Amino acid sequence: MMKFFQQQKNILLALYRDVKPRLTKQQRRPLAELAWLVFGQFVTLLLSFVSIKYITSIGTKNYGIFVLLTSITSICYAVYFNPYEQGYVRFLFENSASRSQRKLFLRKFLRGILKGAGIAFILFTGIVVLARLFFQEAEYFSLAAIIVIILPIANQPITGMLNALRLRKTIAILQIAEKALQVIIFIVLVSIAKLTLTRVFWAISAAFSVLLIARLFVIRRYCVDSESEPEKIQGKIQDVLPPNLDSQIFAFMLPFIIWGIFGGLQANGERWIVESLLPTSDVGRYGLAFSLISSTAVVSYNILSQFFLPIIYETFSSKHEGRKAYGGRLIVVFRWIIVLVFFGFACLFGLIGDTVIGLVSTKDFAVGGMFLFMLTMGIGFFYIAQVETTIGLSLCKTNIYLVPKIAASLSSILLYFVGCFFGGLKGTAIAVVFVNLGYLIWIISVNRKFLASGNEIINADLHIEEPMF
């Protein structure tokens, strides 16, 4: 253990030596990007708390239904749209040799997203039509519910690609606008009538729709030359992009798809277990606690991920071995920052978590400081593990994490059930800790074996001649 921490210390010191003498004008761009990310997420966080205040006014039971529906979005994103985004983001830099090549690559990406969202819409519409034959009074089987599920899974990959293009200011403005529009619509609705679950769905759907159009408008500026004819563009795609691009992206995506199938269960299954064993109002309480953690600690992870990952992927796309080693050092920095973030928020919520919940909702949603501490740490272990997987992803070795992902997912269902059955919500939080801690330990073990087999990318003694970022 001491040897491990000594190695981490050496890596961080080496990175510091490389960065210290070079903090010049060349570094102002990433610092400005980080500032925009922080600003955008901070304002979005404040607006999210206001939005949650309105949404939770529909009561713990209805909010529980809302949580279950949004978990369907998370599962759909994990199974297909996130793998799709990851594949295209990973190969963006290798298909950006010219402006026209990048535009054609982005247009190909965009077409796939819209096609996937269309198929998902048709699928869920069919499910809703069948469901209403049996549950005619269930208002969550509605067009509004479908839109709330579908639009985020189209918005998120586009945002991910805009982030890969390092359009941080644009992303910040769009995120703030989306939440601000939600709040404005809620204010208008409350002034007219009482909020219901269906009205909440329509309000969120309206905001998602407007901002999806805005994101499409932004990214299309990078996709198509205005003077190009559609037929010519098709020919260019065949000529400019590599002929084996689809197979490369699919090979990179496939492990992510398998991850998504099982990871969706691991990340969202506990809500459905709670729904099956406890009242739906407990799903609402659990969901709000999870939202509090997501809006703070997980958002912090997202900020850092959006900042670090494009830079790390870009360094690993370089043919210069020194750049790859430099990217490895950035992964180490990324990891330890995330450890500190989640531990800090866990301690904070353990002390004043219920007070914060009371401010953003009502006392009916209180769950206790110890529950919030355990749940934050459990979720944190999962995201620390995600940082660790960056090593394999950067080297296009996504398949090395399949076994721990599948094992953690399958064991999670049993542990969530046992924890919830014997301990209620607290038992569920303990189960989340054990599942994700085991997952993290396994991922670390996989990385150690991978690096020991001659794939060393983190070398603390290697001096990098390339400038940071």
Image (tube, rainbow, N blue to C red):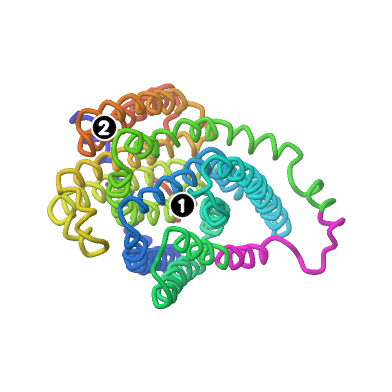
Left or right: 309 as drawn, with respect to 242: left
Residue on which the image places disc 2: 420
The disc label shown at residue 61, or none: none
- Residue drawn at (41%, 45%), measured in percent from left and top? 68
Q: Residue 105 placed where, x, y %?
A: 69, 51
Q: Amino acid at mark 2?
A: Cys
Residue 157 visible in the snapshot = no
- Precedes in sequence: disc 2 or disc 1: 2
Residue density around tag 2, few if under 14, some if 14–19, many if 20 or more, within 10 Å = many
Q: Secondary structure at mark 1?
A: loop
Q: Nearer the viewer, residue 11 or 215?
A: 215
Q: Nearer the viewer, residue 18 or 43?
A: 43
- Residue drawn at (25%, 45%), measured in percent from left and top? 376
Identify the image quadrant of the C terminus: bottom left
Q: Which residues are magenta?
A: 211-233
Vertical comparison of 415 with 128: above or below:
above
Q: Amino acid at mark 1?
A: Glu
Q: Nearer the viewer, residue 418 or 333?
A: 418
